[in-house]
Image (cartoon, rainbow, N blue to C red):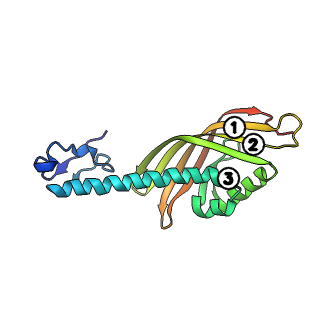
Amino acid sequence: MQRISVVGDLGKGRNAGLDAASVPGSRGVETRLPAGDECLRFAAVTDLQVLTDRLDISDLITKLFVYCDQLRWTDMAEEVLTEQVYFDNGFGGTPETRPATDITADWAEGLGALDAVHHQAGNHLIDITGDTARAHADAIAVHLKNDATNGKTRWFIGSYVLGFDRTEKGWRINHFEYKLKVIDGNADLT
């Protein structure tokens, strides 16, 4: 935990023993906090904003996978992604910044012939700095194709590095990197 310098009265009344380094969002910046009881109100508001941001980002990660499973491509482009996204799908293509609508069109084409898609994600590690954030998430994806003759499923296990911007519409993903760890089953669904 990084320390911050605090100017204010932290040693009296209910503030006695308050560790100024516990104020989230400080990131080692010298901060002038209000004196007395105002310090506690400042810390509570800051804590609430950090919690709200973390929940919003975690929900956005969930939407990324649920909207993919439900083939909600328009919602994905409008509610989850920024208009331009740095994109690396982890399968050997050239990482580049692309329009969200192009990314979702590629996903629609690639996943549209499947009978089902299911993602299970977790292990969210979220780091927020002002109006930007980074997150790590692990996920397992199962693709089902009922008419495949060499096995009906393929499994992808991997990690994501996601970047976020706070926009006028809320948090949105502006950076998408997939790191494949394992593929199992009928990889080509033939």
Q: Quadrant of residue 49?
A: bottom left
- Which numbered marker is on residue 156? 1
Compared with residue 48, is residue 145 higher up or lower down, i.e. above or below?
above
In three-dimensional space, the C-alpha distance between marks 2 and 3, rounded to whole angstroms, equals 12 Å
Amino acid type at image mark 3: Cys
**Residue identified by numbered label 3:** 68
The amino acid at mark 1 is: Phe
* Disc 2 and disc 1 in contact, CB within 8 angstroms: yes
From mark 2 to mark 1, how far is it between C-alphas?
8 Å
Taking 140 as reference, is 6 above or below it? below
Q: Earlier in the sequence, mark 2 or mark 1?
A: 2
Residue visible at 63% across and 59% down in the picture: 76
- Residue that appears at 49% across and 58% down: 165
Q: In the rendered image, which quarter is residue 101 located in?
A: bottom right
Q: Residues within 10 Å of mark 1 (few under 14, many from 20)?
A: some
Residue carrying label 2 = 143
Q: Are marks 2 and 3 in contact (CB under 8 Å)?
A: no
Q: Residue at x 20, y 54 (%)?
A: 39
Q: Is residue 190 visible?
A: yes
Residue at disc 2, secondary structure:
strand
Q: Is residue 79 above or below residue 152?
A: below
